[in-house]
Image: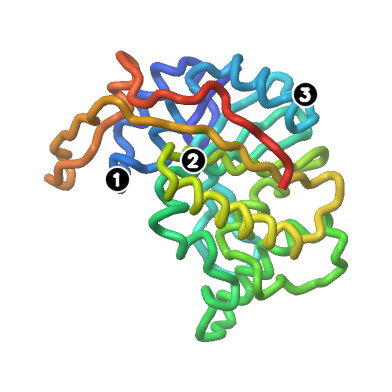
């Protein structure tokens, strides 16, 4: 079993945490932190995940911040939070924590809204993502559905890219126990289901939501960055010594 940020090579989780310490994160409550802590118990998590999604994850390569380029136009790579490569199968893990409550724009902005000026390059980028998905869809349409969420589109395309077996997209949502968080989570799930329905996926493309209650019980250390001079949260080195979150076991997974 190996671990990596973007490209293969790391076979020790502590080394992975050291490498991630140089990453910029926007907030001390970004989803990357509970995601990385949760996956420290990698074998246990994979044993839990396998029967839920119906595939064996054999000799996996776990790639954090996994980049996939669009196949049309000039656009940024889609950066999957965690891509699991296993023989001919791909499991794309898209983590959410406070994002689904506080910042819906990146999740629910549709292709039409993203390309509000009808720019030809953006249209080519969106259709390039759809091209990756098309053989996994029953829809038979050549152009991307305009009402589909743009982030949902390119995350799905990343799971399909180069996959000869099963493509799986798992939204791993860490939620707080407060009622507001649970209500927003229900709305977020409905939006995901709407986007799945627009794809009309074949059996070789599956979507799941993985709900995990997460409570932060310790403060995250802040450090001044040498390159920028800014003070930013630095949680990954801490994870080598202690946990930052408590989880309600492995949570629950079900199909979208």
Q: Residue 101 location, x and y as percent?
A: 43, 53
Dividing the picture into quadrants, the one containing residue 134 is bottom right
Q: Residue 152 location, x and y as percent?
A: 61, 57
Residue 240's place in the image compared with 224, above or below, is above
Q: Nearer the viewer, mark 2 or mark 3?
A: 3
Q: Nearer the viewer, mark 1 or mark 2?
A: 1
Which of pointers 1 and 3 lies earlier in the amino acid sequence? 1
Are the residues flagged by discs 1 and 3 in contact, CB closer than 8 Å? no
Q: Nearer the viewer, mark 1 or mark 3?
A: 1
Left or right: residue 50 versus residue 121 is: right
Residue at (57%, 51%) from the top-left corner? 186
Badge 3: residue crowd in 10 Å (few <14, some 14–19, many ≥20): some
Residue at (75%, 35%) from the top-left corner? 89
Q: Which mark is residue 130?
A: none
Per the image, the residue denoted by label 1 is 27
Q: Residue 88 location, x and y as percent?
A: 78, 34
Per the image, the residue denoted by label 2 is 65
Q: Secondary structure at mark 2?
A: strand
Residue at (71%, 64%) from the top-left corner? 130
Badge 2: residue crowd in 10 Å (few <14, some 14–19, many ≥20): some
Which of pointers 1 and 2 lies earlier in the amino acid sequence? 1
Badge 1: residue crowd in 10 Å (few <14, some 14–19, many ≥20): few
Left or right: residue 143 versus residue 129 is: right
Per the image, the residue denoted by label 3 is 56
Are the residues flagged by discs 1 and 2 in contact, CB closer than 8 Å? no
Residue 214's place in the image compared with 58, above or below, is below
């Amino acid at each position: 079993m190996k671990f990596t940020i973007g490209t293969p090579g790391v076979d020790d989780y502590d080394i992975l945490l050291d490498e991630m310490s140089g990453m910029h994160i926007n907030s001390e409550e970004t989803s990357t932190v509970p995601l990385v802590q949760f996956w420290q118990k990698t074998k246990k998590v994979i044993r839990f995940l396998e029967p839920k999604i119906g595939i064996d994850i054999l000799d996996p390569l776990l790639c954090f911040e996994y980049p996939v380029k669009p196949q049309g136009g000039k656009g940024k790579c889609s950066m999957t939070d965690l891509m699991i490569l296993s023989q001919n199968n791909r499991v794309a893990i898209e983590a959410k924590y406070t994002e689904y409550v506080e910042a819906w724009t990146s999740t629910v902005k549709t292709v039409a809204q993203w390309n509000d000026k009808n720019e030809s390059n953006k249209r080519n980028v969106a259709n390039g993502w759809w091209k990756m998905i098309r053989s996994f869809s029953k829809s038979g349409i050549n152009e991307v559905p305009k009402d589909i969420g743009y982030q949902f589109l390119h995350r799905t395309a990343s799971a399909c890219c180069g996959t000869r077996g099963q493509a799986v997209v798992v939204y791993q949502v860490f939620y707080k126990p407060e009622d507001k968080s649970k209500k927003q989570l229900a709305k977020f799930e409905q939006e995901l289901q709407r986007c799945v329905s627009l794809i009309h996926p074949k059996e070789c493309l599956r979507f799941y939501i993985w709900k995990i209650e997460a409570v932060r019980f310790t403060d995250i250390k802040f450090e001044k960055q040498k390159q920028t001079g800014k003070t930013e949260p630095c949680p990954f080195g801490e994870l080598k010594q202690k946990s930052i979150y408590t989880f309600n076991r492995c949570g629950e997974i079900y199909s979208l």
